Image (cartoon, rainbow, N blue to C red):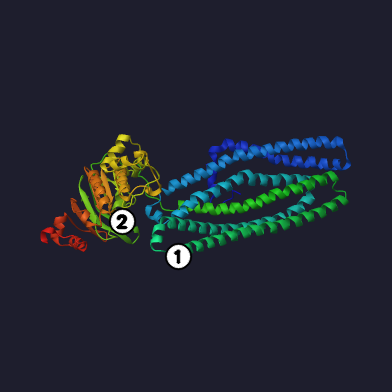
Amino acid sequence: MLTPSEAGFRRLLPLLRPHGRRLVWGGLSMAVFVGSWPVLMHLVGQFIPALGSGDLQVVVPVLGLVLVVFLVQKLAQFLQDSLLAGPALQVSQALRRDLFERLQRVELGALEKLSAGDLTYRLTEDADRVSEVIYKTLHDTIPSALQLVAVLGYMLWLDWKLTLAILLLAPLIAWLISLFGARVMAATERSQKKVSELAGLLGEAIEGLPLVRAFAAEPWLQGRFEEEIDQHRQARYNTYRLVALQHPVVGVIEVLGIAFVLVLAAIRISSGDLDSQGLSSYLTGLIVLIDPIAHLTTNYNEFQQGQASLRRLRAIEKEPAEAADPQPALPLGRPRGDLDLERVEFAYQEGQPVLHDLSLQVAAGQVVALVGPSGAGKSTLFSLLLRFNTAQSGRVLLDGKDLAQVKARELRQQVALVPQRSSVFSGTIAEAIQFGRQASQEQLVEAAQLANAHDFIMRLPEGYNTRLEERGTNVSGGQLQRLAIARAVLGNPAVLLLDEATSALDAEAEAAVQLGLRQAMRGRTVLVIAHRLATVQEADRIVVMEHGRIREQGSHDELMQRGGRYRELCERQFIRDLQNV
């Protein structure tokens, strides 16, 4: 079963190495289980003729030996299955862990193109299917194949001419199994694609239900859902139908083969080449062959389905990952916060630059606002400062150190982001602020006080131990945003990036968040992306960006007096220079 394939099942074999001891004991148990079949065939060959003649002196001891061998076989089977289950599950866990770790390093641009529902399905259902295939391969497929070899070997020893007749059917059965297996794998891939699309639609639908209701679009959504589940049903049905067809086709070939062998056996007995004891053992072997062939047929189908799942999991590895840390890396330490962008050029796609020859200096402790239309390159500049992306040319410096030469983790401990729409993981408020970092209760309280969040936290039923529901639905948008500010300042970063942190809030909530922001900004270098220009008039400097270039920069008063692009943007938002009104 573990044959070379595009899916790469053989690449999973190194994951089994740490479990060598259990595999060895499981293999020994498997050898006992498989080796007992020829012994049972031999004993049955003695038992049936003695039973027919009524010779109790032979029947009783042989029957006792059959029972002993049978019990030993079942004990070995139990040990084999239980010992091999652990490594199979460990491989699945390691695969899922490694792929999730890889997913966390995928470039954000590539990650945003992937469906959350599809990724969830891959790391749950597809990973489970791969685990089942590995387990069945270890505890069922390999023993069945060895059982087939052992029984056929004993049958060759009993009567090689008769066995050769059986072996003539083997290529036909193998060809049929392979033919059906390839079609089952293709049908499974189509089915899994439909399941992923359905999972993606469900994720969008659940998150967007308020919007759907607001537009009275329930019939449209129901129609889309019914169309998706119908396509999913049809894809699954095609897979089931192929599997259902395979069993009777292969079964008919097996029955015809058995009938052919029985006719040949009768001829061999009539010619005196085979005695009754040999025939009993031989027919027992023929019956014993049916079970492993059936198991191999079923398992081959599941293996093909597992290949489809493994291929989908491996596709995650093909997604581009963010740049690795340099070796050796420059130590960043605790920076002052001086930022310097030197003639930076950046493009997400070759030939489509987003930033053009951009140079910008920000002194430590300054507050600089980035304004301009969508697509001007503001968010891209943030992504370079966090090293989500790296410039194709030019340099981005923090305290004179090229960010491409420092470790990403060290950089992100000193450059913190407060996004436009904050998201939190379910857990306590303390855990939401810590976000995987170690912090004392005093540090948590200090961060919350800086973010103007401590008072509302203490009014909650369990204070910092209050549990946040999924997506933070049990707190308001303003409270959630203040938690995001507390999360950002907990590590005392030197640089704070604010991505329109108050744009989605009402006036009262915005006032509370603005107070938290003003407190959090003290003593730090701050870059603010702002579309609502009224929120950035107090910035030390305003940088107007357009088409990836800096169009103009200066204070609010300077830019208003200059009468350029900034004044035009302000006038569109009804912001006037009060001195000139």
Percent x, y of residue 284? 78, 46
- Amino acid type for the residue under numbered disc 1: Trp
Provide the secondary structure element on which disc 1 rests: helix
Along the viewing direction, whichever of 352 and 180 lies nearer the viewer:
180
- Please provide percent x and percent y for residue 193: 51, 58
Q: Amino acid at mark 2?
A: Phe
Report whether 306 appears left or right of 56.
left
Q: In the structure shown, which secondary structural element does the residue marked by tag 2 occupy?
A: strand
Q: Answer with left or right where residue 490 lies relative to residue 46.
A: left
Which residue sits at x=77%, y=45%?
Answer: 157
Q: Where residue 325 sits in the image (x, y, percent)?
A: 36, 45
- Give left or right: position of 9 versus 61: left
**Dividing the picture into quarters, in which one does residue 31 lie?**
top right
Looking at marks 2 and 1 on the same chain, the residue that comes earlier in the sequence is marked by 1
- Vertical side of 534 occupied by 14: above or below: above
Q: CA distance from mark 2 to mark 1?
A: 41 Å
Which quarter of the rendering shows the C terminus? bottom left
Residue 431 showing in the rendered view: yes
Residue 115 found in image quarter? bottom left
Asked if the residue under mark 1 is in contact with the one under mark 2, i.e. CB atoms within 8 Å, the reply is no
The residue that label 1 is drawn on is 220
Check disc 2 and report the residue beneath it: 346
- The label on residue 183 is none
Q: Position of residue 537 (x, y in %)?
A: 18, 54
